[in-house]
C-alpha cells in the first residue's frame, strides 16, 4: 500500500508540473506548441523509467497541446514510449515557433543555451524551468516570462 501511495503522489506531482505549464501559458495550452527540453529521468542517461516527462507530456497532450521535444541521449527510447509527439534534432530547432519552453531534465547543454537565441526562436518568451537551472532575476531582466519550481 505504501508503494502505491508513493507512486500516486509522484504522479500527482508530475501532473502539477503540467498544470504549472498550462498556467504559464495563460490557462490553456490548446493548439499551442510546447517545446520540451529533456526527456530522460536524469541527465547523462537515456533512462526513461519513471521519467517525469512521460506524465507531463501526457497531461499537456490531454490539454490539447502540440509537443515537440529534444533530449541529448533519450530520443530513441522516448520515441517508442511517446510516438505521438514531434522530435527535434537539437535544442534550438525544438524551440522554433514554440509558445513556451519547458525544461524537464537538467542537462548541462541546456544550462549553456544562448538565451538570446532562445528568446528569438520562441513565439512567446515563456520559460517553465522545472529544474531551476536559470536565475529568475536574470530571466526576467532578459524579458522572459519565467516560472520555476517553488514559484507561481
Image (cartoon, rainbow, N blue to C red):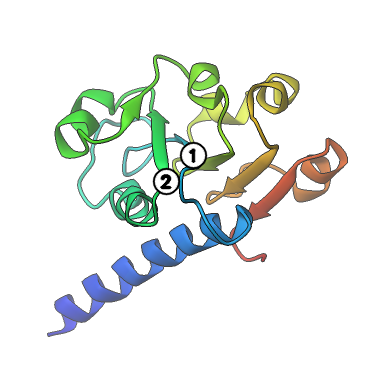
Q: Position of residue 21 (x, y in %)?
A: 53, 55
Residue drawn 70% across the image and 49% down it? 146
Mark 2 vs mark 1, CA separation in Å: 7 Å
**Pointers 2 and 1 in contact (C-beta within 8 Å):** yes
Local SS, label 2: loop
**Taking 103 as reference, is 18 above or below it?**
below
**Taking 74 as reference, is 25 above or below it?**
below
Q: How many residues crowd around disc 1 within 10 Å: few (fewer than 14), some, or many (20 or more)?
A: many
- Horizontal side of residue 5 vs 112, given as left or right: left
> Which quadrant of the rendered structure holds the N terminus?
bottom left
Q: Which residue is mark 2?
A: 65
Q: Position of residue 34 (x, y in %)?
A: 49, 39
Residue drawn 39% across the image and 50% down it? 64
Residue drawn 21% across the image and 29% down it? 79
Can you tell which quarter of the image residue 113 is in? top right
- Horizontal side of residue 27 vs 68, given as left or right: right
Q: Position of residue 3 (x, y in %)?
A: 16, 76
Indicate which disc residue 49 carries: none
Q: Which residue is mark 1?
A: 34
Residue drawn 31% across the image and 75% down it? 9
Query: Which of 106/144 is in front?
Result: 144
Amino acid at each position: 500500500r505504501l508503494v502505491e501511495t508513493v507512486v500516486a503522489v509522484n504522479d500527482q506531482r508530475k501532473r502539477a508540473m503540467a498544470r504549472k505549464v498550462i498556467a504559464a501559458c495563460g490557462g490553456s495550452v490548446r493548439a499551442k506548441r510546447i517545446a520540451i527540453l529533456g526527456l530522460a529521468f536524469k541527465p547523462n542517461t537515456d533512462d526513461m523509467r519513471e521519467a517525469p516527462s512521460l506524465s507531463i507530456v501526457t497531461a499537456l497532450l490531454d490539454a490539447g497541446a502540440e509537443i515537440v521535444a529534444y533530449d541529448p541521449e533519450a530520443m530513441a527510447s522516448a520515441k517508442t514510449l511517446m510516438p505521438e509527439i514531434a522530435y527535434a534534432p537539437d535544442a534550438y530547432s525544438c524551440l522554433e515557433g514554440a509558445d513556451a519552453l519547458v525544461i524537464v531534465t537538467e542537462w548541462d547543454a541546456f544550462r549553456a543555451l544562448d538565451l538570446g537565441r532562445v528568446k528569438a526562436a520562441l513565439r512567446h518568451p515563456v520559460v517553465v524551468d522545472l529544474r531551476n537551472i536559470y536565475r529568475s532575476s536574470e530571466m526576467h531582466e532578459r524579458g522572459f516570462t519565467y516560472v520555476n519550481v517553488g514559484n507561481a
